[in-house]
Image: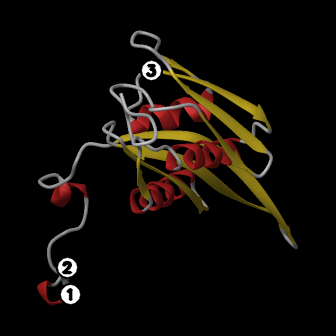
Amino acid sequence: MDKAFRRGPSTGAAARNGEQEEFFEKVIAIKRVAKVVKGGKRFSFNALVVVGDKKGHMGYGFGKGTEVSDAIKKALNHAKKNFINVPLRGTTIPHEIVGHFDASVVMLRPASDGTGVIAGGPVRAVCEAAGIKNILTKALKSHNPVNVVKATIDALKRLRLERFPE
């Protein structure tokens, strides 16, 4: 390639290694969807991803693309732009809370040390990304992964440390 057409330093992984932080990344769901067109079916993919630093900061992302890898990349970029802070009391959450989104309801309860993450699928991934080590959870009503993640995020956003002093 001619030097006149170069646009500066690469923005690839090799260029970012110096300042890139380590994030916990977990793909929760990949879904293939089809659009029926005149010539047949056109397939695309949806990806749901959570990203966190395991220190109380996490985000989720939803990406769509014609390839699985494209959808995951888009979801990761979306997740890194939408981080939230999760207040923690030691290795658990400060108080019991219920999160809602559409038909999904998620109940989160603090747990004592040594309990571990008692959660299923999407809720477990969100808790691990946020750095919660001890928690009891229950997903109620709808178990749609996207809505369960959004209900869990709703609950974590509404947590408050100052409400319950130690």
Q: Secondary structure at mark 3?
A: loop
For the point 45% across and 32% down, the residue is 94
Q: Nearer the viewer, mark 3 or mark 1?
A: 3
Q: Residues within 10 Å of mark 2 (few under 14, many from 20)?
A: few
Q: Nearer the viewer, residue 100 or 121?
A: 100
At which x and y percent is residue 79? 45, 56
Q: Earlier in the sequence, mark 3 or mark 2?
A: 2
Q: Which residue is mark 1?
A: 5
For the point 48% across and 33% down, the residue is 127
Q: Is residue 26 above or below residue 3?
A: above
Mark 2 belongs to which amino acid? Met
- State the image quarter where residue 106 is shown: top right
For the point 38% across and 43% down, the residue is 52
Q: Nearer the viewer, residue 97 or 14?
A: 97
Q: Nearer the viewer, mark 3 or mark 2?
A: 3
Q: Which residue is mark 3?
A: 134
Q: Secondary structure at mark 1?
A: helix
Kindly indicate whether the residue at mark 1 contacts the one at mark 2 (C-beta within 8 angstroms): yes
Mark 3 belongs to which amino acid? Asn
